[in-house]
Amino acid sequence: MDEKECIIPENKFDALKYDYPISVPDLGSGGKTNEWRLERPIIDNEKCIKCLICWIDCPEGTITRKDDDTVEVNYEYCKGCGICANECPTKAIKMQKEE
Ligand code: SF4
Ligand code: SF4
């Protein structure tokens, strides 16, 4: 496994300064998580101000930062913990029960 420099920001509002989120998804022992997730985060791009707080805070690194700083959830690995929805300053992320 490659060693990566630890880049935990002193202030999460500095998220725009960083090139990588705090963690990144990996296969783990059980592989992808989408089948057992209870809730999924839904992003409302109309409310998103591109602050990237969700991107830097997601403990699974499953939020992708796109070239224009909009964000997208990788539902193959998202565990539905709700941290992104809780931390979003504009409430642009809502948790929705899985069917
Ligand atoms: S935390 Fe909310 S406003 Fe900030 S990038 Fe994520 S969805 Fe957009
Ligand atoms: S619900 Fe949790 S795992 Fe899924 S994108 Fe949000 S912070 Fe990441």
Image (cartoon, rainbow, N blue to C red):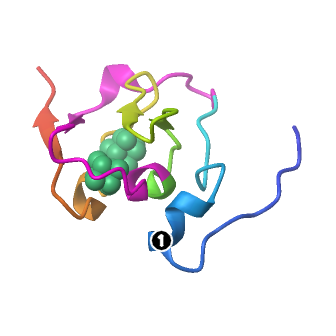
The picture quadrant where one finds residue 98 is top left
Q: Nearer the viewer, residue 12 or 80?
A: 12
The residue pinned by badge 1 equals 12
Q: Which residues are magenta?
A: 27-55
Based on the picture, tell me whether residue 54 belongs to the magenta stretch.
Answer: yes
79 with respect to 38 (left or right): right
Q: Which x, y percent locates residue 43? A: 22, 37
Q: Which x, y percent locates residue 49? A: 28, 53
Crowding around mark 1 (Cα neighbors within 10 Å: few <14, some 14 to 19, many 20+) is some
| Any part of residue 84 in sight | no
The secondary structure that most of the magenta stretch takes on is loop
Q: Name which residue type carries label 1.
A: Lys
The picture quadrant where one finds residue 74 is top left
Q: How many marks?
A: 1
Q: Quadrant where the C terminus lies?
A: top left
Q: Residue at x 59, y 80 (%)?
A: 10
Q: Which x, y percent locates residue 50? A: 36, 50
Q: Residue at x 38, y 38 (%)?
A: 70
